[in-house]
Image: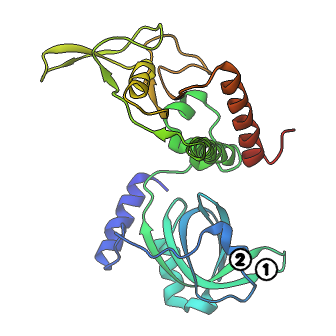
Amino acid sequence: MTEEDKTRKIKELEEKGVIPYASKYNKEIKARDVKKLELGTKGIQTAGRIIQMRKFGKLTFADLMDYTGTIQLAFSINDFGKERYEEFKEMISMGDFIGVKGELFKTRKGEITIKVKDFQLLSKCMQNLPDKWHGVKDEKIKLSERYLDLLANEETRQRFLQRNRIIKFIRNYLEENDFIEVETPILQPQLSGANARPFTTYYHALKKEVVLRIAPETYLKRLLVGGFERVFEIGRCFRNEDMDRSHLQDFTMLEYYASYWDYKDNMKFVENMIKGLLKKVLGSLQ
């Protein structure tokens, strides 16, 4: 379907009183958790993006995706009636966000599926989706249009979720060991904490040049001078230097300081943190 076709369809929907971009929907359960329910459960209400559709005359199967996974949907003329089923076929297409309400059952092929009793268009998609089976292969597109990579590649989505779990564990680990999380200035009057080329900008209110921080080190140490004994920060740092797969100009850094510790204390602390992190995120140290 071309963009012109979709634009025309939006106008047709609006003329029929259908809102193509809803302001709210009460999503009660994630796709992943739907599959944990007992077969026959009624009143299931969820939402997500349609990523696949398979039409068989009076029956249509579709895959609904959210950030936790996918669940199959079944739309039948027997459940909707002819008029409502035709409305569904005209209204919903690949890439659309929809909300559905229905009953859980298992198909003859053993696929756990929601038998849809009612649906609502939440957001009409105006662009064609990437190929489901091949995903986004172009590395430049992956980096510049990350949303397409997320949409098409499960591995990328899992990487984002894993990063979230890693940062959450590190933050909890530090706080459980009496560290206080702080925020230090990103705009700084001069370089400090490392040896790197900075990004510079002009601070009009103060009429002076400032730099984006290359490290939070000296400001964290000032907090120790002020009386805190254990502090940490997880924040963005910026270095105006070369870029490769393991080095970006802006990146997230963890930096912590603990009074009265020597290097042996730090070694033991970091070792235990990494072990705990691997067990939590990967399930083992292997």
Q: Residue at x 43, y 33 (%)?
A: 228
Q: Give percent across and percent down for residue 151.
A: 57, 49
- Report helix, strand or loop for mark 1: loop
Q: Residue at x 65, y 42 (%)?
A: 159
Q: Tell me the residue that label 1 is attached to.
A: 107
How many numbered marks, from 0 up? 2
Whether residue 71 sits left or right of residue 47 in the image: it is right
User: Is tag 1's residue or tag 2's residue first in the polypeptide sequence?
Assistant: 1
- Report helix, strand or loop for mark 2: strand
- The colour scheme used to paint the residues is rainbow
Where, quadrant-wise, is the C terminus in this rendering?
top right
State the CA–CA distance, disc 1 to disc 2: 7 Å
Does 16 sit above or below residue 273?
below
Q: Give percent across and percent down for residue 170.
A: 61, 41
Q: Give percent across and percent down for residue 40.
A: 72, 89
- Find residue 274 and report its image quarter: top right
Whether residue 262 sits left or right of residue 95 in the image: it is right
- Residue 113 badge: 2
